[in-house]
Amino acid sequence: MFPDSRSLPLGARRRSLAQHARRRRRGAASAPAAAAGDTVADLALLRQSVEGLAHPLLSGGARMVCSDVDAISVWVQRLVLQLLERNDQIDAVFALSPDGLVMFDALGRVSRVNAAFTRMTGLTAEMLHGVEEAVFLFRLNTRCTAPHLLVSLESLRVPLGADPADRSGRDVVRLLRPAPRTLKLGLYGGMHGQATQVLHLRDITREKQIDQMKSEFLATAAHELRTPMASVFGFTELLVTREMAPQRRQDVLERVYRQSGAMVSILNELLDLARIESGRGMDFEFEDTDLAALVRGVVHDFAVPAGREAIDVGVAGELPLRARVDYRKLQQSMRNLLSNAYKYSPDGGPVRVAVRLDTGTSGGPWVAIAVHDRGIGLSAEQLARVGERFFRVDKSGALPGTGLGVSIVQQIAELHGGSLEIESRLGEGSTFTLRLPAEPRFSPAA
């Protein structure tokens, strides 16, 4: 890149150094973070120039030589400081990166690993420092599942300028330990012929889980919509193709109406759930609310099924039971819980709602709203699945519903900083308790 200064006269060497210094200053003004290769070239030129200037008897002018050496000394200090600063920046990025990084030297041996890599794989710097590629791959493969073993680092190479997302997926591995996770790997080489290579590992476990949830969600939604849609299609086909008595036609129309309503309910609850999850509470309008009054209002407006007992409401204590909540979202949660209570107690029995201040549970005080029924209850297996999207205790389809109501209540509770707790015994009934953070000034401690 630079001429050999030892082949030039002294004056030419000084001019060469001065010209290069000016170029360096212009380059620093336009690109403060010069490439590491330029710094190495600077030091090489410096060494050649100093070797030429170190012979004052040949050039005749010791004073001039000393002046040049002083200038070069300042230049050396600046270059060293730039190099140290750049190394500090690289060290900070390497250490603080949330992604795993493994650096290989010119001989293909591990020279550094960062803390994120150790956290992901359980392999420490002491276990890997100085090992060759084959040993590194062997130790990493001991933590991978069998179908996802790495054969070579070269297969992970990402061409310069390429988008890693466009690759075929051979760079994805699944680890079993220290914890199950999915990693995306890419090998990046240095620029301008530098030999150092860096293996980059990104934890994409959450992204994979979300993709799987989306696929399952769409498949389940399509399945749930298919049944009412098939009914609507079949009954409308009968209406179009056959002559029917007025009473029979009315019966078919009522079935079409009910199945259409089922589809509307599924779509509305799907949209509610999607809005809640995508917004993560950003569209919630929180306000200081008297929860006892809210519960009484919902109960008053709730349409109790014909022939069933009215809802019994009990409010414990004399303190105001207040919390910051989204009024409409909490009303929706209460309606879902009351609807389930009646739906899953088909043989009758009372439905009770209790509102109280809970100071005994950690993280409180809480306002606890419990909805209790004496219905069919849940088995241990069913209880473990309550809250899953589209999960329904009744598999026969005799009971109306989408299987999304409890999921919506859970999401709303969590976005309020609370929780939904479920207690149930098969054949004895269930209690769904909505627990919300109480306003501190209304707690006994206040």
Image: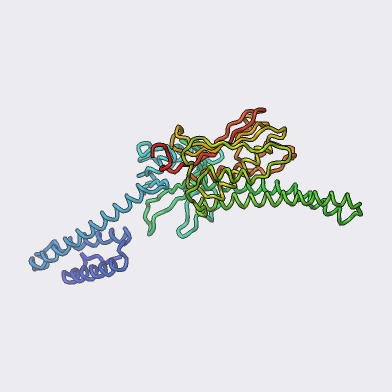
Q: Quadrant of residue 434?
A: top right
> Which of the pair 27/192 is nearer the observer?
27
Is 242 rendered above or below residue 290?
Answer: below
Q: Position of residue 327 (x, y in %)?
A: 54, 49
Q: Position of residue 197 (x, y in %)?
A: 40, 50
Q: Is residue 184 visible?
A: no
Apparent side of residue 259 relative to residue 379 in the rendered image (left or right): right
Q: Quadrant of residue 313?
A: top right
Of all residues shown, which one is farthest toward the front?
A: 318
Q: Quadrant of residue 307?
A: top right
Apparent side of residue 303 relative to residue 420 in the rendered image (left or right): right
> Which of the pair 2/399 is nearer the observer?
399
Q: Residue at x 57, y 53 (%)?
A: 275
Q: Residue at x 48, y 45 (%)?
A: 323
Is 236 rendered above or below residue 298?
Answer: below
Q: Is residue 252 visible?
A: yes
Q: How many marks?
A: 0
Q: Position of residue 92 (x, y in %)?
A: 32, 50
Q: Quadrant of the C terminus?
A: top left
Apparent side of residue 145 relative to residue 442 in the rendered image (left or right): right
Q: Residue at x 16, y 69 (%)?
A: 10
Q: Position of residue 393 (x, y in %)?
A: 67, 36
Q: Quadrant of the N terminus?
A: bottom left
Q: How is the image coloured?
A: rainbow
> Which of the pair 147/228 is nearer the observer?
228
